[in-house]
Image: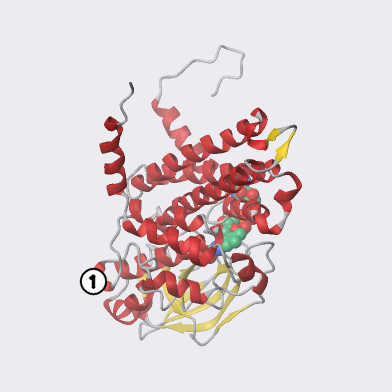
Amino acid sequence: MASYENTRPERISHVRETHPLLQVARNHAEQNILPNVDAWNAAKTWPREASDKAGAAGLTGLYAPEELGGQGLPLSEGIQVYEQLGLGDGAYAFALSMHNICTYAGCGYGTDAFKEKWARDLTSGRKLANFALTEPQSGSDATNMYSRAVINDDGTWTISGAKAWVSLATEADIYFNVVKTSDTPGHKDMAMIAIPADAPGLTFGPLYKTPSYGFLPLAEMNMDQLGVDEANIILPIGQGMQGSLMAIDIARVSIASGCCGLMQAALNTALSYSMNRKMFGCKNLDLDGIQWMLGEVATDLEVSRLLYKKAAQALGTPEGPLMTAHAKRFVPDAAVKAANTCTQVLGGMGLLLPYGLDRLSRLAQMLRIVDGTTEISRVVIGRALQKRAATLPDLPVPKGFGEAD
Ligand SMILES: Cc1cc2nc3c(=O)[nH]c(=O)nc-3n(C[C@H](O)[C@H](O)[C@H](O)COP(=O)(O)OP(=O)(O)OC[C@H]3O[C@@H](n4cnc5c(N)ncnc54)[C@H](O)[C@@H]3O)c2cc1C
């Protein structure tokens, strides 16, 4: 007779390795996000009450040190929180991930004066932060930046320019902006500076009209001769782009994590429905074709989990950018496929609002774009492949077959 005893220790140790905050995040998704997300989208306002609760539960200072009120989690553990939040809503998970990254940067690299003023409010979620890199003319081509900071004699900075696609626009209390400090092309003069929402000269354009994450305010941010104290410099001149790339890598893996929650939510809905819907004398779920469709989703989900966790482990190592690119290329695509497949499994019902699958499809597509598109991930992977090719022995191309010079 097969013994199941032997499998137990492994299972228990797996449970022990799981950080209690993951359960907290799951509860937050089940109790605060899922029951309310349709109402939030209809109201088109950021659910501050929910993010306050997330803060009180410890979800807004994941990587910040405990002495500043944070949870002190390593990135590889903290990033798993977004898989749980993604069970509720991917856009909400994304916004909290951006807040956590800014909080990590502010608590790690900010000046003492900045930490004194902001750290505890950020780690507790009483104040929210977001990251502004994209400009109207530069998304993927991020170094083509027009925002300029002029450094005054007294050390203060005067900033002019515009950012685009600013998440939590008008809602965040502070924006971590990447700016150029000269007209020299390239990124060597870039810096990151935190701009409080009440800084004179800071205004926002009208909120963008989005299809199904209406509660996430998005807008253009305009900076007109805006003055900022030097205490707010998070990354000095020369480190702005490097620091942004690290922040974006963390954001990309966080998105892959959130996508896994989204895929699980879609799969759960499809399973729950198709074990009740009857056709051709059986349950939908008894049909091979339905099982195969959902089986593919289940495999993609398992692969996606392994990939984002491996990428999260690699953050901060030389392999980090490439592993991140693999995760950001693969997982959101898998999430789009999963959400569409699960919609198909429900037939017409899959298109109706209460099942939430249409929302998941649109969210998954959004997650393919934000924080570096799938194509940009392919560019990163392609460059790594070229480097690898250069280390391999030549495989000669026969004469006349288009050999390289
Ligand atoms: C919901 C949402 C929230 C966002 N929040 C923020 C935020 O808070 N802060 C912030 O700074 N930014 C934010 N962004 C901006 C986001 O990071 C950019 O949209 C993204 O980087 C892509 O830039 P783009 O939209 O300008 O597209 P473009 O750069 O114009 O790209 C257009 C198309 O060209 C493709 N492409 C680009 N380069 C190449 C290439 N070399 N080879 C092949 N194809 C290529 C792209 O993949 C894309 O398909 C947000 C975006 C969204 C949708």
Taking the image as shown, residue 64 lies to the left or right of residue 405, namely left
Three-letter amino acid code at the position of disc 1: Glu
Say whether residue 236 is visible: no
Residue 149 location, x and y as percent? 47, 75
* Residue 394 coordinates in the image, percent (x, y): 44, 19
Q: In which quarter of the image is residue 26?
A: bottom left
Q: Residue furthest left?
A: 67
Between residue 363 and residue 395, name the one nearer to us. 363
Above or below: residue 270 compared with residue 360: above
Q: Position of residue 4 (x, y in %)?
A: 32, 30
Where 175 sits versus 185, above or below?
Answer: below
The residue that mark 1 highlights is 67
Asked if residue 77 lies left or right of residue 374, the reply is: left
User: Which quadrant, please, contains the C terminus?
Assistant: top right
Tag count: 1
Q: Is residue 300 visible?
A: yes
Q: What element carries label 1?
A: helix
| Image quarter (top left, top right, bottom left or bottom right) of the N terminus | top left
- Residue at 47% across, 58% down: 85
Instruction: Decide: is 95 above or below 45.
Output: above
Q: Residue at x 66, y 54 (%)?
A: 355
Residue at the spot 50% in from the left edge and 46% down from the top edge: 328
Give left or right: position of 317 versus 306: left
